[in-house]
Amino acid sequence: MLRWSAWIALRELYGMDGTMESPIIAKLPRGHRMDRQFGIVYDVAPSQADDLTLIDGIRTREAVLLNQRGIYLFGQIALWRHREIVEIGGELQIPVSRIVDEGWMEQARSLSHPVPTGSAYDLPASAFRTISLLVCALLV
């Protein structure tokens, strides 16, 4: 029987019907395959590879080694589960706890889904705020 967290992880990765419908997977460029050790990998580097050193804890050495194993994108790291983390830790010769403590997967998830930043001045003022400002201006 699957533990609840494992079930949630599988559901997030594959969707309810077993197909790969994850939004992260949907955003990955074509040409990837599922590797038993490292999860989703590319045999040939995609045209738009991410700068993995933007993840705190991944230095140039780790980024090069990840690229050599077919890992080029934040989305790939965001989808790592325990098995992939253990394998990657062994390949990079770093403790698994470092990957988990530094939150590589969480950082990759946030980097693969950038939050659009816009200033508050771009948003229209609400009707209540506009009326309040007009009333205050008339009272002064």
Image (cartoon, grey):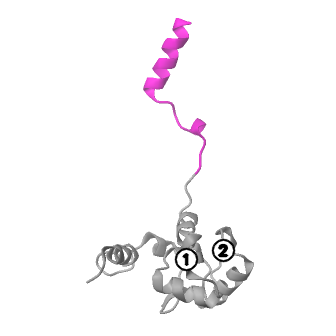
- Visible residue check, residue 40: no
Q: Does the magenta run of residues contain 119?
A: yes
- Label 2 sits on residue: 52
Please tell me how many numbered marks the rendered image carries: 2
Instruction: Decide if residue 47 is on the left or right side of residue 126.
Output: right
Q: Of 34 and 28, which appears nearest the observer?
A: 34
- Inspect the image, locate mark 2, and give the three-letter code of the amino acid beneath it: Leu
Q: Residue at x 65, y 73 (%)?
A: 50
**Picture quadrant where residue 111 is located:** bottom right
Q: Of 60 and 116, which appears nearest the observer?
A: 60
Q: Does the magenta run of residues contain 89?
A: no
Q: Which residues are magenta?
A: 117-140
Q: Residue at x 60, y 76 (%)?
A: 98
Q: What's the mark number on residue 77?
A: 1
128 lies above or below 122: above
Q: Are the residues at dot 1 and dot 2 in contact (C-beta closer than 8 Å)? A: yes
Q: Residue at x 55, y 86 (%)?
A: 41
Query: Magenta segment, principal secondary structure?
Result: helix
Earlier sequence position, callout 1 versus callout 2: 2
For mark 1, does the 10 Å Cα neighbourhood hold few (<14), some (14 to 19), or many (20 or more) residues? many
Instruction: Decide if residue 135 is on the left or right side of residue 55.
Output: left
Image quarter of the N terminus: bottom left
Residue 88 is situated, as x and y percent measured from the top left of the image, at: 57, 86
